[in-house]
Image: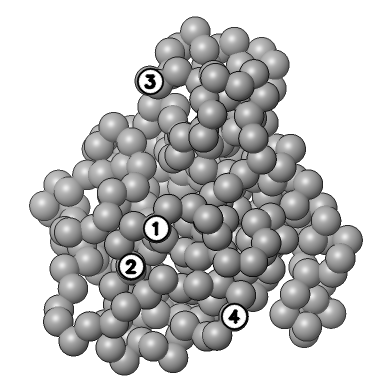
């Protein structure tokens, strides 16, 4: 589902009750939603220029990442230091509103990284980014964690928009790795769709939703920033590290940013946290 944010909602910096209800319903039932026009373009343009430069470093090192560690897919996030950390992303009021509506008080972020899909990339295996708490249930539990994806450009079928399998987040008995037989059986029930989104949109999906990266058939690198918001009782790992000078981006809000700040250099390109 796509939610088109209105002028009044942009002015208020929150979704209307109807749009919020539709958003939560889509995530619960389909496993994903795309909220359009909630991230201003200026910070995205700044990030894209820097991330394009960083991609060239990773490509030369053949530092392929993501599910399968296949050619053309980079595990690459935005720089964790000023002037590249923006409140419009890490403290986006629309995204936080949705996470709070899903999980209640105490939500926190555990991830700040991403994936870059390069020209001539290969198709990833079908996979989930998170597991079911009780994996043998016929119909699994409601979401406890969501991935937020924000791209600094339009994402479409030409530049490798993510393949999403609606409703699969509720299939508790999902084996890993997924076989071709499992994939084809599900395709006959509900076929996959592509997460096409305009620049400034946020794709929010349950971590258990089946998905995969697909070939980028364009001539341009396509970035995707990722965060993961969790329900308050979820086990916390290590805090996210940012350089001092970026603190002002982390506005006081309903999201625990789970962040610490350091004066030490951060090797954010080669020592990043794993994400598929």
The answer to whether marks 2 and 1 mark residues whose Cβ atoms lie closer than 8 Å is: yes
Residue at x-position 69% and y-position 16% = 189
The quarter of the rendered structure image containing the C terminus is top left
Which of pointers 2 and 3 lies earlier in the amino acid sequence? 3
Marking on residue 253? 4
The residue at which mark 2 appears reads as 239
Q: Where 68 falls versus 254 (above or below)?
A: above
The residue at which mark 1 appears reads as 236
In screen coordinates, is 57 left or right of 141? left
Query: At numbered mark 3, what does the secondary structure look like: helix, strand or loop?
Result: loop
Query: At numbered mark 4, what does the secondary structure look like: helix, strand or loop?
Result: loop
> How many angstroms separate mark 2 from mark 4 (CA)?
17 Å
Which of pointers 4 and 1 lies earlier in the amino acid sequence? 1
Q: Where 158 falls versus 113 (above or below)?
A: above
In screen coordinates, is 54 left or right of 215? left
> How many angstroms separate mark 4 from mark 3 (CA)?
38 Å
Which of pointers 3 and 1 lies earlier in the amino acid sequence? 3
32 or 46: nearer the viewer: 32
The quadrant in which residue 170 appears is: top right
> How many angstroms separate mark 2 from mark 1 (CA)?
8 Å
Give the crowd class for mark 3: few <14, some 14-19, many >=20 residues within 10 Å: few
The residue at which mark 3 appears reads as 177
């Amino acid at each position: 589902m796509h939610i088109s944010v209105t002028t009044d909602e942009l002015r208020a910096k929150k979704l209307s009750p109807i749009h919020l209800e539709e958003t939560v319903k889509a995530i619960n039932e389909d496993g994903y939603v795309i909220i359009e026009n909630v991230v201003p373009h200026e910070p995205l343009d700044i990030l894209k220029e820097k991330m394009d430069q960083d991609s060239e470093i990773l490509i030369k090192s053949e530092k392929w990442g993501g599910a399968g560690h296949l050619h053309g897919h980079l595990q690459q996030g935005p720089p964790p230091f000023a002037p590249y950390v923006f409140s419009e992303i890490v403290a986006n009021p629309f995204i936080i509103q949705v996470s709070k509506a899903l999980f209640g008080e105490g939500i926190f972020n555990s991830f700040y990284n991403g994936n870059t899909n390069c020209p001539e990339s290969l198709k990833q295996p079908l996979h989930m980014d998170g597991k079911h708490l009780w994996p043998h249930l016929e119909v699994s539990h409601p979401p406890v964690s969501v991935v937020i994806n924000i791209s600094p450009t339009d994402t479409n079928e030409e530049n490798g928009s993510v393949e999403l399998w609606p409703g699969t987040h509720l299939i508790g008995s999902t084996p890993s790795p997924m076989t071709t037989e499992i994939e084809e059986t599900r395709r006959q029930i509900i076929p996959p769709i592509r997460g096409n989104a305009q620049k400034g949109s946020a794709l929010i999906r349950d971590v258990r939703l089946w998905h995969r990266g697909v070939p980028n058939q364009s001539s341009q690198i396509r970035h995707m920033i990722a965060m993961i918001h969790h329900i308050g009782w979820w086990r916390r790992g290590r805090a996210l590290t940012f350089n001092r000078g970026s603190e002002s981006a982390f506005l006081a809000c309903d999201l625990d940013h789970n962040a610490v700040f350091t004066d030490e250099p951060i090797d954010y390109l080669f020592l990043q946290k794993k994400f598929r």
